[in-house]
Image (cartoon, rainbow, N blue to C red):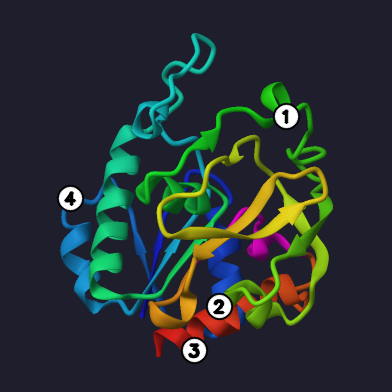
Amino acid sequence: MIGITKCEKDFDKYLIWLDFFNARYCVFDYKDENALNKFDVCTGLILSGGVDIYPEIYNDWDTVDDAGKFIPERDGFELNLLSIAVSKGIPILGICRGCQLINVYFRGSLIYDIETIRKVNHRKISSEQQRLHDITLTPDSLLMDIVKISNGFVTSSHHQAVDRPGEGLIISAKAQDGIIEAIEYSDFSKKHFLLGIQWHPERFENYDSEFSKNIIKRFISETN
């Protein structure tokens, strides 16, 4: 049974994606006071996308314009779930914000705003149109082992990203502009499955993409 954290927007796309691949799952909502107690039945954890992580958690600070848009309660809840999963060796997949949360958990840092700091745009083109860009994978990484190709196109819908990888993590994919697109354990062969990806595999128009199908199929196999 895969546990997936609930996000504020487009959550149905995750469930449609999981249903398409016949995954068994249960939803974890930070608003449910008993949610943590239900995690014992789970053999995998997917951390979904959503609002920015509260900056003070990774030693940054918010701006006047961003004040009030964070959900510290969700941050705390998901960090607790992640801690349990890591301690038990449960497979973990972080998507977009989930990738960033993994990095923060392992004491890494984030780029607060890509457009301001790196002068590149990774947001969606519009609410209806996805942005796509090319990524290059790190040879001999878990991600390469999963998708079997060295580069390809992925969805892009974010304004933050991993900056300094956390302790024990390595970069397993980058965009052409240098933005980190995936992280994993530095020695994945000796630890449980852990992968953070910056793109949204559930938003591909065609799930046959190696960056969608291969990832969820491998994750399901890891949780069985």
Question: Which part of the image, by quadrant, shows the N terminus?
Answer: bottom left
Chain-order first, disc 4 or disc 3: 4
Q: Which mark is residue 221?
A: 3
**Disc 1 marks which amino acid?**
Arg
Q: Nearer the viewer, residue 83 or 51?
A: 83
Q: Residue at left 82%, top 67%?
A: 151
Which residue is under mark 4? 33
Give the mark nearest the N terminus, 3 or 1. Answer: 1
Vertical side of 103 occupied by 205: above or below: below
Q: Secondary structure at mark 3?
A: helix
Find disc 1 in the rendering and name its residue: 118
The residue under label 3 is which amino acid type? Ser
Residue most extreme to the top:
64
Disc nearest the viewer among 3 and 1: 1
Circles 2 and 3: CB distance less than 8 Å? no
User: Magenta segment, which residues?
Assistant: 195-204
Q: Which residue is located at x 51 percent, y 53 percent?
A: 99
Q: Is residue 50 left or right of residue 56?
A: right
* Distance Cα–Cα, label 4 vs label 2: 26 Å
Question: Which class describes the residues within 10 Å of circle 2: few (<14), some (14-19), or many (20+)?
Answer: few
Q: Quadrant of the C terminus?
A: bottom left
Reply yes or no: does residue 198 show up in magenta: yes
Q: How many angstroms separate mark 3 from mark 1 (CA)? A: 37 Å
Let me know if residue 144 is in the magenta part.
Answer: no
Mark 4 / mark 2, whichever is N-terminal? 2
Q: Secondary structure at mark 4?
A: loop
